[in-house]
Image: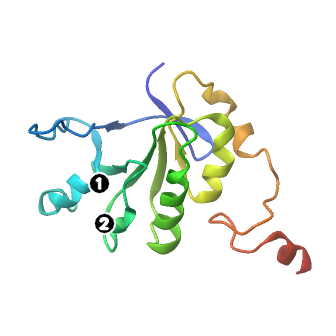
Amino acid sequence: MPDVIFQDGSIQRDDWTVVPRPAEGESLKIPEQGKALIPADLWLAGYEHFAGNYSVGVWFDSHDEPEILEGKVNELPVIAVNFPKFSDGRGYSIARLLRERFGYENELRAIGDVLLDQLQFMKRCGFSAYALRPDKDIKKAVRCLNFFSQGYQAATDTDVPLFRRRAS
């Protein structure tokens, strides 16, 4: 099966290549054809070169700080957040900061060790696309994203808690 993601309620072809961080002393190797996600700090370092190029997006590792892109986030067509292992929850915080504090409006993608049972929580934090771990059945994503009909607390998908929604 070609590389696919789950986005907008369906399985779609993934046109983006995640470019790994180069080793010490090596240069960044961006594919000549197609779209590329590069480390956020390297995009910022080459901002003059990358600004306005909508075939280049960025990815954050779980220990990166999204503040480095403050004021520039909506110049990016895609921001991906890497989950190096499913138990590392820092990516959820990065997503909330990008959506709520920095006002990011474009595609926010979860990559790495992304499991089906995390999708509902990722959605509530602001993710809009999911690159599941290859051994997971992407056809189950719709059910997992809509497993709960209501969330109790406010989040990026609804800014009003359930008790206030019920009162009105």
User: In this figure, which residue is indicated by the disc labeled 1?
Assistant: 40
Q: Position of residue 33 (x, y in %)?
A: 21, 35
Q: Nearer the viewer, residue 35 or 61?
A: 61
Above or below: residue 5 compared with residue 74: above
Work out which residue is located at the far top of the displayed protein and give it: 1
- Mark 2, residue position: 68
| Residue 131 coordinates in the image, percent (x, y) | 50, 36
* Among numbered discs 2 and 1, the one appearing first in the sequence: 1
In the figure, is residue 166 to the left or right of 90?
A: right
Residue name at image x 47 percent, y 48 percent: 109
Give coordinates of residue 88: x percent, y percent: 53, 44
Name the residue type under label 2. Ile
User: Seen from this angle, which residue lies furthest right?
Assistant: 167
Give the side of residue 85 with respect to residue 146, left or right.
left
Q: Residues within 10 Å of mark 2 (few under 14, many from 20)?
A: few
Q: Residues within 10 Å of mark 1 (few under 14, many from 20)?
A: many
The residue sitting at 45% across, 66% down in the picture is 104
Residue 11 rendering spot, x and y as whole percentages = 57, 34
Answer above or below: position of 167 versus 3: below
Question: Is the C-beta separation of discs 2 and 1 under 8 Å?
Answer: yes
Helix, strand or loop under label 2: helix
